[in-house]
Image: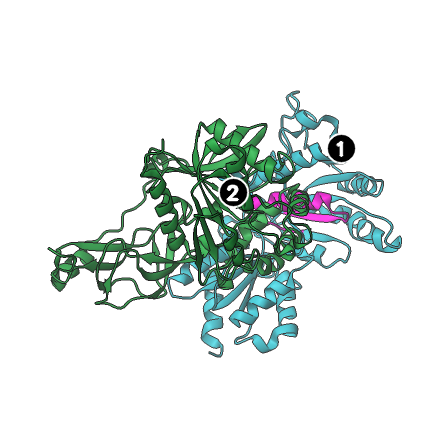
Chain colours: A cyan, B green
């Protein structure tokens, strides 16, 4: 498995392999092919950041450029899924979900339930999430909790190229609607990825690092901040365990509870706003189910409850840092029981 | 001058077990300072992200200094301790420890070294293999078991390569080789191994097989004796009827880390040896498209209902090859008493404190036995 590719390449490869395997897999989105006003070459663009570049040349009309109307093409993708296709719709930024929210939470998410389990909606909505891209308040949000809140949707947010490929393949093969969240600041992040196809099952968290003093539960870009914190803390002889949830719905609470039972301490790190966040949810679940194991109060590391700032220095301060995560771990160690 | 007074200082350094190892953690010292140690005696336990194992004395001498403390994590080649004869002064030991600089593995060094893994095209299948060592003479070919891969020989390849060139492959449908079998049954796999040897230009080899790989080795010795110099069977399939079909079925069915960990724990006498990394590596393989179906079909062909369908090892005597049989006494997959079915004249070693993956759990002993086995056969000048 010596081959290293970027997260962006991992997405491209997963789409390519699934389109090759299954003729019902189609892709649609804004400028994912060439875009109006392009230089006339097939496949000159491949989406706003070039993720689908190269696919049009291989799979032709199974990739579709859409008008700048999320409500129209997300609705079309949901409808196509209900009619037997496996559409992968690229919705540029998760921030734009507002204009097509009915199609997602009140239609796609409800079909299986309202049709007595007989309807399936195998649609994937790929979308960019997260801050740090200097893209201002309307293109930088981490809205994962909004979708995790809704029964009937599956929510995925990977942190590595290996997980990205396996989880995207699983998302396409899954028979329920999946919101697939890609952190734009991880697109260039490289890692070892097998060339062959593989699927990672939903609802299994990854134990990124083992440790006995404190558990850090997180996902997406924040996994890397947690790793920075772990490296700093290791120099102080503090060994943290890092759990990457990978899928927020379904949630692998067992792995979280096992870890907290072992360490007795918990820091939840989330790039989403603090209120009603994944961090808040995990904290509540652990208090309900493993209160007796806790040796210290749970810490949450999140951005402040404000829109993502456009000013670069402020944006950098907004995103939780490795140092903040390390401080939160130290606090649980200082204030807790032995 | 005898060993105890020789003015030689022998460093004990962090070993490099497998190409991915960068550091290890000292778990426990097994001997005290001042102890007289013979060659090959275990000195301390080291744990990597793959597994724990003992570091052995490279030379005889007295353990004069423990440099590394229990629990300390150190890079490969870091100084762990110092051995020397009684004639060496404490001041000399102090000076040696103070002056020791851990050699850094430079980028260049890694680039110049042979690649960790290579690929060969054999009958339309892409086969991953590793080749180590520069010794001339008959090489040693390692064949892993059901669901395994060449990394099952993590602790063995480098050690045995001091004696002979070693080659290990991922069998078809395993590891990173193409997910397709050359045919059903042991005979087809043995034929494929012969083709692999042909493609790599290996005329003749010592075969070392583990579990299902041992049945393949025995079959190849019977089918194609001129290709085989000797056979070493480790926790062998093919020497008797029983096998724990629950294991192979659970191995195929396990899809989560939790399920798989419980399954892999059955491979060891000490289940704590199953690390997170080991489970993750096996999961990565099992998740590849087609692997589950392939393993299920292979398991049904070979081990249906707790019975081994093929037992080529029982006929191995007909091949007239030197045979070494190694087993872990606590093997829960294939019972160790099958070692009794080894052909007449075979060397049989049943090791305590080891399960099915005896070549990992008792790596040092298995390496010693394999090197002796290969050396004995090399001596008469088989060419």
Looking at the picture, does residue B259 appear above or below residue A199? below
Query: Which residue occupies the foreground of this view, B379 or B290?
Result: B379
Q: Please give the name of the residue rendered at 71% of the width and 34% of the height, measured from the top-left corner.
A: A21
Cβ atoms at labels 2 and 1 below 8 Å apart:
no
Query: Is residue B97 visible from the viewing direction of this image?
Result: yes
Asked if the magenta segment contains residue A175, the reply would be yes
Q: Quadrant of the C terminus of chain B?
A: top left
Badge 1 is on which residue?
Answer: A23
Looking at the picture, does residue B228 appear above or below residue A258? above
Q: Is residue B66 left or right of residue B211?
A: left
Depth check, mark 2 against mark 1: the one in front is: 2
Q: Secondary structure at mark 2?
A: helix
Query: Which residue occupies the foreground of this view, A229 or B282?
Result: B282
Q: Secondary structure at mark 1?
A: loop
Looking at the picture, does residue B178 appear above or below residue A259? above
Query: Which residue occupies the foreground of this view, A109 or A213?
Result: A213
Magenta-colored span: A156-181
Q: Please give the name of the residue rendered at 60% of the width and 37% of the height, measured from the top-left corner.
A: B187
Q: Is residue B298 left or right of residue B162?
A: right
Q: Is residue B285 left or right of residue B371?
A: right
Badge 2 is on which residue?
Answer: B316
The CA distance from mark 2 to mark 1 is 51 Å
Query: Is residue A190 visible from the viewing direction of this image?
Result: no
């Amino acid at each position: 498995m010596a081959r290293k590719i970027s997260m962006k390449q991992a997405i491209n490869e997963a789409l390519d392999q699934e389109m090759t395997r299954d003729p019902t897999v189609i892709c649609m989105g804004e400028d994912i092919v060439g875009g109006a006003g392009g230089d006339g070459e097939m496949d000159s663009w491949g989406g706003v950041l070039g993720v689908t570049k190269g696919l049009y040349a291989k799979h032709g009309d199974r990739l579709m450029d859409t008008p700048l109307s999320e409500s129209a093409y997300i609705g079309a993708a949901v409808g196509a899924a209900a009619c037997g296709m496996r559409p992968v719709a690229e919705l540029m930024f998760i921030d734009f979900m507002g204009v097509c929210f009915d199609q997602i939470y009140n239609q796609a998410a409800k079909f299986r339930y309202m049709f007595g389990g007989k309807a399936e909606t195998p649609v994937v909505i790929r979308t960019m999430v997260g801050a740090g891209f200097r893209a201002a308040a309307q293109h930088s949000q981490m809205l994962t909790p909004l979708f995790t809140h809704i029964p009937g949707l599956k929510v995925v947010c990977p942190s590595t190229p290996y997980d990205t490929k396996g989880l995207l393949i699983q998302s396409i093969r899954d028979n329920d609607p999946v919101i697939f969240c890609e952190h734009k600041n991880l697109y260039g992040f490289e890692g070892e990825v097998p060339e062959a196809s593989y699927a990672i099952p939903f609802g299994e968290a990854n134990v990124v690092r083992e440790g006995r003093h404190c558990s850090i539960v997180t996902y997406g870009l924040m996994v890397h901040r947690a790793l920075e914190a772990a490296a700093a803390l290791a120099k102080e002889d503090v060994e943290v365990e890092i759990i990457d949830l990978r899928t927020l719905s379904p949630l692998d609470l067992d792995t979280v509870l096992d870890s907290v039972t072992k360490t007795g301490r918990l820091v939840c790190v989330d790039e989403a706003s603090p209120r009603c966040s994944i961090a808040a949810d995990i904290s509540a679940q652990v208090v309900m189910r493993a209160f007796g194991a806790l040796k210290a109060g749970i810490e949450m590391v999140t951005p402040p409850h404000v829109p993502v700032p456009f000013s670069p220095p402020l944006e950098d301060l907004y995103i939780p840092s490795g140092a903040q995560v390390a401080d939160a771990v130290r606090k649980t160690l200082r204030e807790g029981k032995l | 001058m005898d060993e105890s007074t020789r003015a030689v200082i022998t460093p004990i350094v962090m070993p490099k077990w497998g190409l991915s190892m960068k550091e290890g953690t000292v778990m426990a010292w097994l001997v005290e300072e001042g102890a007289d140690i013979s060659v090959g005696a275990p000195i301390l336990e080291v744990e990597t992200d793959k597994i724990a194992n003992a570091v052995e004395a490279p030379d005889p001498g007295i353990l004069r200094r423990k440099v590394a403390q229990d629990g300390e994590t150190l890079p490969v080649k870091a100084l762990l301790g110092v051995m020397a004869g009684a004639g060496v002064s404490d001041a000399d030991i102090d000076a040696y420890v103070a002056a020791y600089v851990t050699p850094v593995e430079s980028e260049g060094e890694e680039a110049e070294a042979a690649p960790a893994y290579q690929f060969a095209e054999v009958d339309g299948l892409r086969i991953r293999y590793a080749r180590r060592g520069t010794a001339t003479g008959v090489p040693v070919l390692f064949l892993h078991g059901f669901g395994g891969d060449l990394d099952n020989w993590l602790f063995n390849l480098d050690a045995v390569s001091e004696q002979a060139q070693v080659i290990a492959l991922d069998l078809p449908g395993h590891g990173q080789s193409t997910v397709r079998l050359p045919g059903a049954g042991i005979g087809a796999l043995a034929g494929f191994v012969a083709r692999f040897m042909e493609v790599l230009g290996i005329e003749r080899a010592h075969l070392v097989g583990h579990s299902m790989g041992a049945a393949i080795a025995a079959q190849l010795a019977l089918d194609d004796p001129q290709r085989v110099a000797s056979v070493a069977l480790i926790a062998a399939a093919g020497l008797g009827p029983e096998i724990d079909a629950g294991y192979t079925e659970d191995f195929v069915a396990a899809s989560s880390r939790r399920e798989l960990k419980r399954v892999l724990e059955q491979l060891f006498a000490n289940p704590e040896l199953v690390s997170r990394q080991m489970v993750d590596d096996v999961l990565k393989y099992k998740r590849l498209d087609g692997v589950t179906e392939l393993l299920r079909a292979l398991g049904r062909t070979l081990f249906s209902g707790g019975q081994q369908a093929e037992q080529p090892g029982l006929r191995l005597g007909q091949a007239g090859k030197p045979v070494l049989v190694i087993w872990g006494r606590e093997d829960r997959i294939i019972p160790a008493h099958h070692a009794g079915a080894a052909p007449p004249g075979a060397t049989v070693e049943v090791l305590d404190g080891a399960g099915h993956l005896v070549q990992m759990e008792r790596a040092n002993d298995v390496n010693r036995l394999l090197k002796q086995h290969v050396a004995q056969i090399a001596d008469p000048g088989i060419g």
